[in-house]
Amino acid sequence: MSGQEKRTPIPMVDLQSEFSLLKPMLLKEIMEVLESGHYILGKKGQLFELRLADYVDAGFASGVANGTDALYIALKSLGIGAGDEVVTTPFTFFATGEVIAQTGATPVFADIESDTYNLDPKEIESKITDKTKAIIVVHLFGQAANMDAIQEIAKKHHLYVIEDACQAIGTEFKGERVGALGDIGCFSFFPSKSLGAFGDAGIIVTNQESLSHKVTQLRNHGSTSKYMHESIGQNSRLDEIQAAVLLVKLTFLDLFLHKRKEIAKRYSEGLVDSIKKPIVPNSRAHTFHQYCIELDERDQLADYLKQEGIASAVYYPVPLHLQKVFAGLGYKKGDFPVAEQAANRILALPISPELSIDAQYTIIECVNQFIKKG
């Protein structure tokens, strides 16, 4: 921008603009909570559970403190623990593998599809042993994984399917929203998510009443009635203020997801063809929690965008099988080449409903300029 007036920085996510838009409704809901004097496991949380369950077409929903707890409690509700194995992707946020290890089970990784970055069904079956109890499928960046193929493998080997839909609220597979397609599904409402709280929050959904009962126990010290404990659980409850915030934002979710798709379409049409852009198979859908491009000069482009006042982010620079904490599992570089290539080449561009059209075209122009400079 030499010789030019410095432009307004473009962030990855603009939560302040979102708050300004929804401020009157948010403050009204929050004040109702404050005036009620009931801050944990109250009416707002119960109403949000009902509405979220309805939104994803699940029979039951239980609010928890965060998305990581949602995954951990989901595993525990299925009885997964020491001596068990769980197959999942190495290309995901750390929590997906972390919670498996926290239960005492062993994470077993399988490579990903090069076009969607989701778990590749063709890679799963060779990882299954007599110790395998479940598959955690991640709907990464907001794109649905191939649930038909994964469910078929799970059914053949009598495995549970846990959906990590933390980035994929509202995403569909063959017209059905993810999260309620497997045995149990998990969502995160971290502030930057497509449906974000004002702090940490999460929820677990299922169509199995017995699982829902177990989840409700585990999130509240293993108890479903005061001072009576049926199992060893934990303190992981969705508080009323976060539930109030999420109730407001849920009413706008479909509109905001539509805006994300519009921005993604504009990016895909405007960016030069030499960049690998998101690919969405016909049977699936993408809600673009992240819009990721792929190129060899990823780091140089990120530096260039930063100089231009444009944020970007790398999701994820080190796959789980190469993380130091998982060194004891015996994986090495080269074991999952598709995931490793993605980790070296992917860059996420700003995408949030509040991103102006001018900002979108600025981002497109800057990326294309970098490519043309070569």
Image: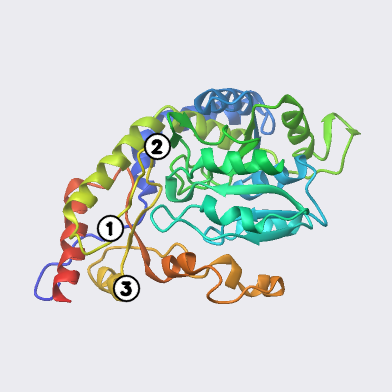
Given residues 214 and 339, the one toward you in this image is 339
Disc 2 vs disc 1: which is toward the camera?
A: 2
162 in relation to 228, above or below: below
Residue 283, numbered circle: 2
Residue 146 x, y percent position in the rendering:
49, 43
Q: Position of residue 75 (x, y in %)?
A: 72, 46
Corner quadrant of residue 260: top left
User: The C terminus lies in which quarter of the figure?
Assistant: bottom left
Task: Judge whether 94 appears above or below 324 on screen.
Answer: above
User: Residue at the location (43% across, 32% down)?
Assistant: 174
For marks 3 and 1, the one nearer the N-term is: 1
Q: CA distance from mark 3 to mark 2?
A: 29 Å
Name the side, left or right, on which 341 lies relative to 7. Answer: right
Kindly tell me whether residue 186 is visible in this rendering: no
Q: Quadrant of the N terminus?
A: bottom left
Q: CA distance from mark 2 to mark 1?
A: 33 Å
Taking the image as shown, residue 71 lies to the left or right of residue 79, namely left
Residue denoted by label 1: 10
Q: Quadrant of residue 364?
A: bottom left
Query: Hey, what amino acid is under mark 1?
Result: Ile
Q: Nearer the viewer, residue 232 or 144?
A: 144
Tell me which residue sits at (10%, 70%) in the image.
4
For the point 44% across and 33% down, the residue is: 249
* Mark 3: amino acid: Asp
Mark toward the viewer: 3 or 1: 3
Q: Residue at x 79, y 58 (%)?
A: 104
